[in-house]
Amino acid sequence: MSTTAESTSSANQTTTGALSFANVGKRYGEGPFAMQGFDLEVSPGELVAIVGASGCGKSTVLRMIAGFESHSEGEITLDGKHVSSPGPDRGFVFQDYGLFPWLTVAENVELGPKEKGLPRVERRGLVEQYLDLVGLGRVRDKYPHQLSGGMQQRVAIARVLANRPTVMLMDEPFGALDALTREQMQSDLSRIRRSVGTTVLFVTHSIEEAVRLADRVVIMTGGLSHGIPGHIRRIFDVTLGTDRDPTSVEFTDLERLISQEVHAQA
Amino acid sequence: MPLAVLVFWSLGVQFGWNLPFGIRMAQLPTPSQVGIRLADLFFGGLVPGPYSGDIWRHIWASLVRAGSGFALAAAFAVPFGILLGRSRTVTQLFEPLINIVRPIPVTAWAPLALIVIGIGDRSAIFLVFLAAFFPMLISTSAAAAQVPPRLLEAAAMLGMKPWKRLIYVVAPASVPGIFSGLRVGLGLAWALLVVGEMTGVNIGLGAMIMEGRVVSQIDLIMSGMIIIGILGFLSDRFLVLALKVISRNRPVLQEIS
């Protein structure tokens, strides 16, 4: 936890958090496949962004890992274990935060450690550590409705991290925030994930956001409304280093490349 | 507004107005007569009679009946309502039964209760229980069914077991619905209390009102009505206060996104 400052974008001491999708498919009942042949390997500590048009099933991918939805074909494993029902090893950050309105900020963050049965002192320590990490130490006794959207999302991130998950799943986490807050949250997320080393799977509809944050960008296409099952079209490696400048030529080139791929006809 | 009602009332009695429904206001006592009777009920010495200065005994008896019937109903209706709102199996098992029993007016239960349970406290408490139970059950289960799925997903991914989610997520998220059910139930508890007390028991506000009818003391009837109204109002205030104390001022009543 101490020497994280100069670690590069994906070089972490993490050894857990290997996610694997093998030929994953999903259909509702006997209907057509909403997703088919989804293959992806995510290494421990990696941040992978999934982009694609709405309806391509990118959120469904996250919800299947989380165990909120089932898959009807193939295998999803986390560190070699099949995932089925939701569990604290897979933290989820929702677009609409999903904080408990009747609990204070600190109590929201403490909930996971409490469910694990950790003693009070240890819980308090975790709450403090992760609220500080997201820069919210001073609002620990406020209720969610007293905070701005950006702050609520920080609480949601701290709540997930305090549970020490092996993978953090983020479903358009900054989609509801204004542009300025969004940019701040992006740079904070870069910093935070480098310091905690958790694997992150990140769904977004902003290609810029994906290029800015991810080690790899997965482009999904298809989906029920397009008449073909959702699948991966292409995966881009992002080799832009830690401090990424969205105005640099390399950045904008990659952004354009991905954008063309997303919008190309299936 | 209460003042306007008083003025209307005393003028109506004075001039013998006839209102719609065939209400003959000349039959009524004046507000001051009722006021004197109320004072006598509490302090005695103004209107000699069996109730003079003795009202606390009756208030207490009614309060105990309404309170225990209501509390009993809440103790069953809230947990059961939460299960009903969240579990398809529980719904399938109980919904037909509930929907058949619920429309039966509680007043129709009164004769049955008197025969099967007998005259006394237990009949009255049972009727209050029945009256308060269904509105609380329905409103709790509707609230529990509408808990945002997001909150349940959040609890699940944080490692909370399903049964604990009922207590720590569904219950607090349903507080607005549970609370409005409790308020409706409390109102009905008072209504049915009077019905329960009008048959056979000697002590209680309903019994007092019934006695007022038997001996044609309309001021006694109206005093009983006013006391029940005030008790109903105060008990509702008490419920609001109790929620504040229990929730320790947590934002449980605010809209959940």
Image: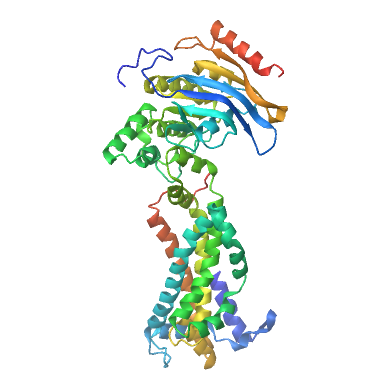
Number of marks in picture:
0
Side (left or right) of B29 relative to B239: right
- Please identify the residue farthest to the top as the structure is shown: A249
Depth check, front residue: A141 or A206: A206
- Residue A116: percent from left, percent from top: 35, 39
Q: Residue at x 38, y 82 (%)?
A: B57
Q: Residue at x 53, y 65 (%)?
A: B184
- Residue A8: percent from left, percent from top: 40, 12
Q: Is residue A13 visible?
A: yes
The answer to which image quadrant residue A34 occupies is top right
Q: How is the image coloured?
A: rainbow
- Residue B238: percent from left, percent from top: 42, 64
Q: Residue at x 37, y 13 (%)?
A: A7
Q: Quadrant of the C terminus of chain A?
A: top right
Q: Residue at x 51, y 83 (%)?
A: B116
Depth check, front residue: B181 or B212: B181
Q: Is residue B168 above or below residue A91?
A: below
Depth check, front residue: A166 or A92: A166
Side (left or right) of A28 relative to A12: right
Q: Is residue A134 above or below residue B162?
A: above
Q: Is residue B86 above or below residue A22?
A: below
- Residue B209: percent from left, percent from top: 50, 85
Side (left or right) of A186 relative to A104: right
- Please identify the residue farthest to the left as the structure is shown: A121
Q: Quadrant of the N terminus of chain A?
A: top left
Q: Is residue A99 visible?
A: no
The answer to which image quadrant residue B96 occupies is bottom right
